[in-house]
Amino acid sequence: MYVDVKAIPNAKVDSVEIIGQNTYGHTIYKIKTTAQPEDDKANKAIRKLLAKYLWVSITTVVLKHGHTTRDKVFYIS
């Protein structure tokens, strides 16, 4: 399952919300994290928040695209 994420680093609180679906049927989430967007800290925090929100193991959540951008695609195995 692929999941699209709009990442917002440096937020005041951590949060996850569904904002819709794209043309491929992937769910789009807006994930806010308090982590800084440096040294992969924000990506790791977003991955952890997404795993917790979806009730899956963090090892099943893999960042496929968007390592350095706010628009990301994760694969959940």
Image (cartoon, rainbow, N blue to C red):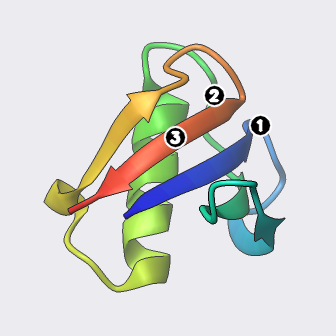
Q: Which of marks 1 and 3 is nearer the N terminus?
A: 1
Q: Residue furthest left?
A: 59
x and y, in percent, of residue 63 in the image: 37, 37
Q: Is mark 2 on a helix, strand or loop?
A: loop
Q: Where is residue 11 in the image (x, y as percent from the top left)?
A: 81, 47
Residue at 15 percent across and 56 percent down: it is 59
**Residue 9 or residue 19, whichever sits in front:** 19
For label 1, the residue is: 10
Spot the residue most to the bottom. Answer: 55
Reading the image, the residue beneath label 3 is 73
For the residues bearing labels 1 and 2, Cβ distance under 8 angstroms: yes
Residue at the (72%, 29%) spot, across then down: 70
Compare residues 17 and 42 and report the one nearer the observer: 17
Q: Which amino acid does label 3 sit on?
A: Val
Q: In which quarter of the image is residue 52?
A: bottom left
Say above or below: 66 vs 19. above
Q: How many marks overall? A: 3
Q: Residue at x 63, y 55 (%)?
A: 24
Mark 1 is on which residue type?
Asn
Marks 1 and 2 sit apart, C-alpha to C-alpha, by: 6 Å
Between 65 and 41, the one nearer to me in the picture: 65
How far apart are the alpha carbons under marks 3 and 2?
19 Å
Residue 2 lies in quadrant = bottom left
Mark 3: few, some, or many residues within 10 Å (few <14, many ≥20)? some
Please tell me whether mark 1 or mark 3 is closer to you in this view: 3
Instruction: Give residue 36's mark.
Output: 2
Residue 53 against residue 70 in the figure, above or below: below
